[in-house]
Image (spheres, rainbow, N blue to C red):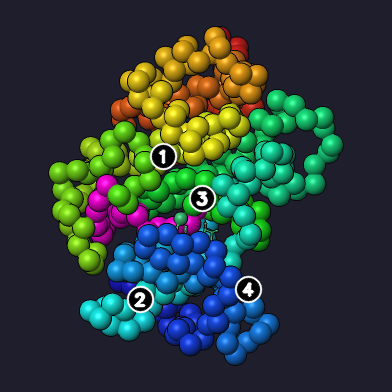
Amino acid sequence: FDMFVLAFVERLFRPTFKKDDFVLGKKLGEGAFGVVYRVSMADNPKRDGELVVKRATEYGAVEIWMNERVRRACANSCADFVYGFLEGSSKKGGEYWLVWRFEGEATLSDLMQSKDFPYNVETMILGEVQNLPKGLERENKIIQTIMRQILFALDGLHSTGIVHRDIKPQNIIFSEGSRTFKIIDLGAAADLRVGINYIPKEFLLDPRYAAPEQYIMSTQTPSAPSAPVATALSPVLWQMNLPDRFDIYSAGLIFLQMVFPSLRSDSALIQFNRQLKRCDYDLVAWRKTVEPRASPDLRKGFQLLDLDNGIGWELLTSMVRYKARQRLSAKAALAHPYFDREGLLALSFIQ
Ligand code: ADP
Ligand code: MG
């Protein structure tokens, strides 16, 4: 009851908006289900560019629902959601409008395109840094920080009962305000604990980053309805199916791409996926096939993962696995010694 009152009061005092309040500016993105614009306020030029708006199709209803939930349960995980509303009637092809604070210019994908990655991210996330020589240790520290932030955000979502299902560098934005990476685009997300779930039509999943299971909760999910459907899925089902591990696999692929520059392009990632499938999704087997004739670039990636007794490689292979239940949860990944120098020392003593 308290939660309900709080939510109500919070909603009451939050600014509400309608279509005419916004002047659409630069187009930032265009997906199959919506278009995102940077906007200014019609009556307040001081707020130019502070917000972004997504004009979405019927799937926008789910996305608004997910964003409202995230706002209350794990606000730091995702872009700061401001407001969502239906413009027009849902029956007559109305649009859902979603409003967020503008977090920053760059997604992780934009940043990874740079030849200088990950150094181009260094001061953004670590603040002013001493000018150490470029090298494996320094690169490792930056990638480690990015991975920690991604896993932290994922842990927030998963603890709330939300599986994102479209984790990829394009959906991870650098928030200039908080100097951290945050998740965006909850358009394909599922909330399994409360039971808002609509479904994994195959085309909703990005095959480049999708885990092999493709369908999570496959037996419970009906074909895509035009509005959210409530199905009663218990925490027990969550435990049985471990749907959160779908996102972990995708995050593992991001880790891989950060480490290996030659796997950053779409075509290279697609080729990697084919190779991995041929190895029955066994990264160790994949490594054996590529390492003997590895390019200097690939070799450098393995060196990076092999630092500190191969703790990075250990983490990567604990995320990118065929069986969902063998993958680490986000929380377990955060506790992995890869993120903890003292843990590392302990590990080297054990070995
Ligand atoms: P879709 O992938 O469905 O087009 P996204 O929600 O991923 O929609 O947003 C598309 C693009 O818009 C993102 O890649 C990002 O560049 C930009 N964007 C989205 N939300 C924000 C935000 N809160 N702040 C800044 N840029 C954003
Ligand atoms: Mg997107």
Residue on which the image places disc 4: 49
Q: Position of residue 4 (x, y in %)?
A: 33, 72
Q: Which residues are magenta?
A: 183-202
Q: CA distance from mark 3 to mark 4?
A: 20 Å
- Compared to 245, does 11 lie above or below? below
Q: Is residue 70 above or below residue 343?
A: below
User: Distance between the Cα atoms at labels 2 and 1?
Assistant: 29 Å
The residue that disc 3 covers is 170
> Does any portion of residue 327 appear in the rendered image?
yes
Crowd tier of the residue under label 1, counting other residues whose Cα lies within 10 Å: few below 14, some 14–19, many 20 or above: some
Question: In the orientation shown, which residue stands out farthest toward the front?
Answer: 267
Q: In the rendered structure, which disc, 2 or 3, sits on the residue that comes first in sequence? A: 2
- The quarter in which the C terminus is drawn is top right
Q: Nearer the viewer, mark 1 or mark 4?
A: 1
Q: Amino acid at mark 3?
A: Gln
Q: Nearer the viewer, residue 139 or 37?
A: 37
Secondary structure of the residue carrying numbered label 4: loop
The amino acid at mark 4 is: Gly
Q: Is label 3 within 8 A of ligand 1 (CB to nearest ligand atom)?
A: yes
Residue indicated by mark 1: 208
